[in-house]
Amino acid sequence: MASRPVRLLGDPVLRQRCDPVTHVDGTTDDLVANLIATVDGSNGLGLAAPQIGVLKRVVFINVDEPWLLVNPEITWMSPEKMVVWDACLSYLTIFFQVSKAKKIRVRYQNLDREMKEIEAEDSLSELLQHEIDHLDGILAIDRVLDNRKIITREEYEKRFGPPKI
């Protein structure tokens, strides 16, 4: 399957709430293959289906190993917060700080429709919150802490080196 173009900030698809996956079929297989190819081709860490124009509740992440979440939902968030720099494959030219829960629990299904639940913390927690927000039409830029501190990618790289998005 080929990589698909990532929808960019301003595209109305990114603001829509996704429908749950009710059954797995060839269309789901194609979506998964497209998500994997797009993440692999972007050097990104994760991607939600609406970012390639598919309004289904599916997220693919590739942190240490490939991981697919179907119908993910956050079931618990720690009261402890962390402030992190965030960016998105849908707007690669800007970075900003957001506040996220330090730990979360996520319930999801795999492609075999088995229910799973994991606890994630730190950078994995942030990534999962970011991608699950996409499924509800929420962008990280909606959660920016201070508009005056939005910086360019060039400035980010000068300060911190190449980003992991």
Image (cartoon, rainbow, N blue to C red):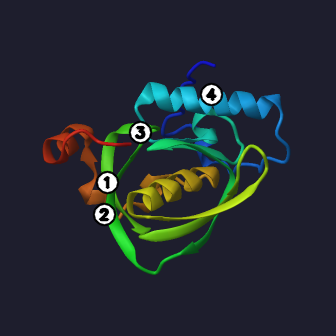
Q: CA distance from mark 3 to mark 1?
A: 11 Å
Q: Residue at x 40, y 79 (%)?
A: 80
Say the numbered circle drawn on residue 34. Answer: 4
Q: Are marks 1 and 2 in contact (CB under 8 Å)?
A: yes
**In what element is the residue under mark 3?**
strand
Label 2 to label 4: alpha-carbon separation: 34 Å
To which residue does mark 2 refer? Answer: 146
Q: Amino acid at mark 4?
A: Asn
How far apart marks 3 and 2 lie (CA) works out to 17 Å
Q: Between label 1 and label 2, give the one nearer the viewer.
A: 1
- Which residue type does callout 2 highlight? Asp
Q: In terms of image quadrants, where is residue 98?
A: bottom left
Identify the amino acid type marked 1. Answer: Phe
Rendering quarter of residue 91: top left
Q: Which is more toward the observer, 163 or 8?
A: 163
What residue is shown at x 46% (from left), y 53% (from top)? 127
Give the secondary structure at mark 4: helix
User: Which numbered mark, 2 or 4, is in the foreground of this view?
Assistant: 4
Q: Which residue is mark 1?
A: 96
Of mark 2 and mark 4, the one earlier in the sequence is 4
Q: Choose the circle earlier in sequence order: 1 or 4.
A: 4
Report if the CB atoms under discs 3 and 2 are less than 8 Å apart.
no
Question: In front of the other: label 1 or label 4?
Answer: 4
Label 1 element class: strand
Query: Mark 3 = which residue?
Result: 91
Report the residue at 46% width, 25% height from top.
Answer: 41
Q: Is residue 104 left or right of residue 145?
A: right
Residue nearest the observer in this picture, 141 or 86: 86
Asked where in the image residue 12 lies, by quadrant, the reply is top right
Q: Residue pushed farthest left?
A: 158
